[in-house]
Amino acid sequence: MNPRVICPSMSSLLAFEASARHGSFTRSARELCLTQSAVSRQVQVLEESLGVELFERTGRQIALTQAGQNYAAEIATALSGIRRATERVMQQGGEALVLNLAVLPAFGSKWLLPRLPRFYAVNPSIQIHIHSRVGPVDFGSGLDAAIVVGDGCWPSVAAYQLFEEELVPVVSGRLASTAVWRRPADLASLKLLQVAARPDLWRSWFQAQGLGTESLALGPKFELTAHLLQAVCAGLGAGLVPRFLVEDELASGVLTVPVDGVSLRGTSYYLVAPCPKVMNEAFIAFRQWLLDEL
């Protein structure tokens, strides 16, 4: 038998594995930094070499055949083994596996860092260097990847959605015990604290409640969400923050959501990386661990 059939090309296998995982040529193309047609063609070449249909195609929809499901499970295991072997060889050669990761400071301190020991427990040979970034991420400065908030539309980077952002108003428990707010409009009487990088959040929240914003008086700005939260906890005013950042404070009563209203949604947290970096062994391991955590 032709050895090329016995061992298909790595590019075809990667295209198939990503397509099987995403259930989409388009999403796998985004991950691999290829065009949709290139991924589709790589999978077609693989099917032709094997003489087996791996996907059922209905219009633009794809679904694994039974043979495709069986093959995908074995290929995923094989590729994982190849990555582990590559990691070991790199270690023996004295090259450390390193990922330079930019994160939003509040996300890093409140969500990522408390979980990071679990990453090192299963990936002891990889080092994650954490860099705090508030504004746009410059990958030309040596960064390999970043965790950012946005709509997922960034040119020249691969983006993996982590979870949707849900913004809720919060005040300190002490402040809430001395006042009564019944409607979303009542919050306009408070100092509405802002994150400098996202100055339109309060207006968007009030609009989501069906309220006007013409006479809305916004309060002090903070560069870091962590500083804004400290100010809210001290009773300075109300903050509009991602719910996952304040789950512990809400559970303990340090903070409270003062009124019922519509949460502000529309953006998500993403892991992003320049296309050449997505095949970095450290990035692959971190991405998989991150998705498993979620």
Image (tube, rainbow, N blue to C red):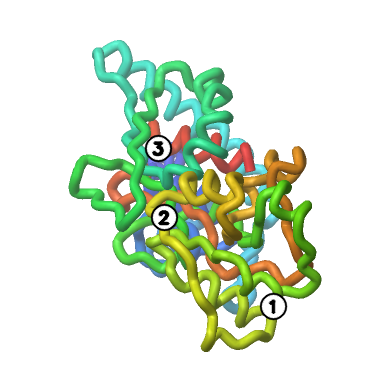
Q: In the rendered structure, which amino acid carries the disc numbered 3?
A: Phe
Marked residue nearer the N-terminal end (3 or 1): 1
Separation (CA) of disc 3 from disc 2: 32 Å
C-beta proximity under 8 Å, tags 2 and 1: no
Residue at 19% over, 49% down = 140
Residue at 36% over, 39% down = 101
Separation (CA) of disc 2 from disc 1: 23 Å
Marked residue nearer the N-terminal end (2 or 1): 1
Residue 77, position in %: x, y?
57, 32
Which of the 4 image quarters holds residue 190? bottom right
Question: Which residue reaches farthest left?
Answer: 140
Residue 55, position in %: x, y?
61, 60
Q: Can I make out residue 45 in this image?
A: no
Q: In the rendered structure, which amino acid carries the disc numbered 1?
A: Ala
Separation (CA) of disc 3 from disc 1: 45 Å
Q: In the rendered structure, which amino acid carries the disc numbered 2?
A: Phe
Q: What quarter of the picture does the C terminus occupy?
A: top right
Q: What quarter of the picture does the N terminus occupy?
A: top left
Residue at 49% over, 71% down = 218
- Frontmost residue, 68 versus 128: 128
Residue 23, position in %: x, y?
60, 59
Q: Name the residue under label 2.
A: 222
Of labels 3 and 2, the one closer to you: 2
> Residue 185, labelled with which disc?
1
Above/below status of 35 relative to 185: above
> Residue 283, labelled with which disc?
3
